[in-house]
C-alpha cells in the first residue's frame, strides 16, 4: 500500500478527477487553489486556499506533501521553481514555462521538424504592417489564454489596427488553417521510451471551446501513426513524466499540424475514464508517483459531450441514466456562460 501524499495545484474539474483517481490508488491528495469555491475540495483529503504567489501558504502546502503536480498551466514559473527546490514538481517547471508561452511552444515544436500553423510574433504597432501573409488569421495573446479567451479572428490589417492592442502584452498571429478535423493525442510517459498512449481522439469545438470528443477518430492510417509519433517525439524531447496532451489540426488535404501542447490531463480525455481500463488521470498519478505501469486496454468506443453554462441544468434533473451513460457534474457553485459545468460520456 502506498503512503504517498501528492499535492495538486489548481482545483477545477481536472483536479477533481485526478483526486478521484488517486483515491483508488491509495494516494492522498492535497489541493492548493486560489479559488475558495474550487470543486476539487469535494474530492481531496485536504484543501488549501491561497494565491499562487503567497509564499507562506505555498510553504504550508509543501510541508504537507511528498511531491507536487498541477492541473492547469497558467501558474507562475517562479512558484513552481521555488516549490521544486523543496519537493519534486512533475512535469518539470521548465516544461510548464515553455508550454505556457505560445511562441516558445511553437518554436520548440518546429525545431523537432513537426508542422505547426504559420505564425508571427507581434510586439509593437509597427509589426502589424507586414502581416498580409498571415491573413486570414487568429490573433492570440502569447500567455494566459484558454478556451478561446484572449483570441481574435482577423481578416484584414485594418481590423487588426482597430483592435488597439495593449502592447504591454505579447501576441502571436496564426494563419487560419482550413480545418477538416481536430484530434488530440493523450499519452502518459513513465520514463525513457516508456509510454501508455491512447488512440487519437476526435474533437469538435464550438466558439473555440471543446464541445464533443469521440473515439475512434475518423482519420486515415497516416494521420493516426503520425499523430502518435509526434506526440511521443515531443514527450521524449521534454523528458516528460506524467500525462500530456497534444492538440492537432487536420487540414482539407489531410496534412497534420500541432496546434498546442497541454502539460497535463486534458478535457478531450474525459472519455478515458469509462472507455479504458486505466484513465488519463490514473495514469498521470501512476507516472508522477512512480507506481506500476499497467498496459492500456480499450473497453469500448465512446463519445463525450461537454455541458457548458446552463446546459448542465437539464442533466441535473435526470433521475436515472442509461447503463452506458456516465454523467459528471463538476459541482461548480455558479453557472456561467461559456463555463464548463460537467460532461456526459456515452459508451457506444
Ligand atoms: P486554447 O488555448 O483556448 O485552447 P487554441 O489555440 O487551442 O486555444 O484554440 C482554440 C480553438 O480555436 C482550436 O481548437 C480551433 O478550433 C480554433 N483555432 C485556433 N487557432 C486556429 C488556427 N490557426 N486555425 C484554425 N482554427 C484555429
Ligand atoms: Mg486548445
Image: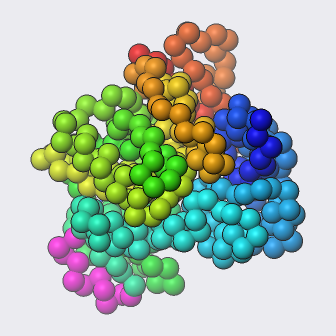
Say if the magenta span includes residue 327.
Answer: no
| Placement of the N terminus among the 4 image quadrants | top right
Instruction: Give the side of residue 26 with respect to residue 17, left or right.
Output: right
The residue lying at 49 percent from left, 46 percent from top is 188
The residue lying at 36 percent from left, 87 percent from top is 125
The residue lying at 74 percent from left, 54 percent from top is 7
Compared with 108, 61 (above or below) is above
Q: Quadrant of residue 172?
A: bottom left
Tag count in the figure?
0
Magenta span: predominant SS is: helix
Start-end of magenta stretch: 124-134
The residue lying at 35 percent from left, 38 percent from top is 200
Along the line of sight, the residue nearer the viewer: 151 or 16 = 16
Instruction: Give the side of residue 215 with respect to residue 288, left or right.
Output: left
Q: Quadrant of residue 206?
A: top left
Whether residue 125 is visible, yes or no, is yes
Instruction: Give the side of residue 152 with respect to residue 71, left or right.
Output: left
| Placement of the C terminus among the 4 image quadrants | top left
Along the line of sight, the residue nearer the viewer: 135 or 142 = 142
Q: Position of residue 201 (x, y in %)?
A: 37, 36
Whether residue 270 is visible, yes or no, is no
Q: Quadrant of residue 278?
A: top right
In the image as oriented, which residue stretches furthest toward the left? Answer: 253
Compared with 108, 335 (above or below) is above
Along the line of sight, the residue nearer the viewer: 80 or 302 = 80
Q: Position of residue 137 (x, y in %)?
A: 27, 64
Compared with 19, 261 (above or below) is below
Amino acid at each position: 500500500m502506498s503512503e504517498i501524499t501528492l499535492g495538486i495545484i489548481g482545483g477545477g474539474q481536472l483536479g477533481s478527477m485526478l483526486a478521484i483517481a488517486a483515491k483508488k490508488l491509495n494516494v492522498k491528495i492535497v489541493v492548493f487553489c486560489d479559488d475558495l469555491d474550487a470543486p476539487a475540495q469535494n474530492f481531496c483529503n485536504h484543501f488549501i486556499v491561497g494565491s499562487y504567489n503567497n509564499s507562506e501558504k505555498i510553504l504550508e502546502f509543501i510541508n504537507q506533501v511528498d511531491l507536487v503536480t498541477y492541473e492547469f498551466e497558467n501558474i507562475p514559473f517562479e512558484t513552481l521553481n521555488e516549490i521544486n527546490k523543496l519537493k519534486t514538481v512533475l512535469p518539470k517547471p521548465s516544461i510548464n514555462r515553455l508550454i505556457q508561452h505560445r511562441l516558445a511552444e511553437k518554436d520548440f515544436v518546429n525545431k523537432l521538424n513537426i508542422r505547426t500553423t504559420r505564425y508571427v510574433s507581434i510586439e509593437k504597432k509597427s509589426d502589424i504592417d507586414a502581416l498580409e501573409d498571415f491573413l486570414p488569421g487568429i490573433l492570440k495573446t502569447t500567455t494566459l489564454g484558454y478556451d478561446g479567451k484572449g483570441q481574435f479572428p482577423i481578416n484584414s490589417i485594418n481590423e487588426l489596427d482597430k483592435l488597439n492592442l495593449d502592447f504591454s502584452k505579447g501576441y502571436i498571429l496564426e494563419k487560419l488553417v482550413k480545418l477538416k478535423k481536430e484530434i488530440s493525442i493523450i499519452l502518459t510517459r513513465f520514463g525513457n521510451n516508456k509510454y501508455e498512449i491512447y488512440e487519437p481522439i476526435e474533437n469538435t469545438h464550438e466558439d473555440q471551446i471543446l464541445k464533443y470528443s469521440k473515439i475512434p477518430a475518423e482519420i486515415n492510417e497516416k494521420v493516426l501513426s503520425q499523430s502518435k509519433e509526434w506526440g511521443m517525439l515531443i514527450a521524449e524531447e521534454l523528458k516528460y513524466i506524467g500525462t500530456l496532451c497534444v492538440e492537432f489540426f487536420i487540414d482539407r488535404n489531410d496534412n497534420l499540424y500541432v496546434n498546442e501542447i497541454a502539460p497535463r490531463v486534458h478535457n478531450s480525455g474525459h472519455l478515458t475514464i469509462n472507455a479504458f481500463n486505466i484513465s488519463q488521470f490514473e495514469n498521470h498519478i501512476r507516472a508522477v508517483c512512480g507506481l506500476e505501469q499497467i498496459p492500456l486496454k480499450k473497453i469500448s468506443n465512446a463519445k463525450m459531450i461537454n455541458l457548458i453554462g446552463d446546459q448542465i441544468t437539464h442533466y441535473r434533473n435526470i433521475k436515472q441514466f442509461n447503463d452506458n451513460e456516465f454523467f459528471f457534474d463538476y459541482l461548480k457553485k455558479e453557472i456561467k456562460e461559456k463555463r464548463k459545468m460537467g460532461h456526459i460520456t456515452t459508451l457506444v
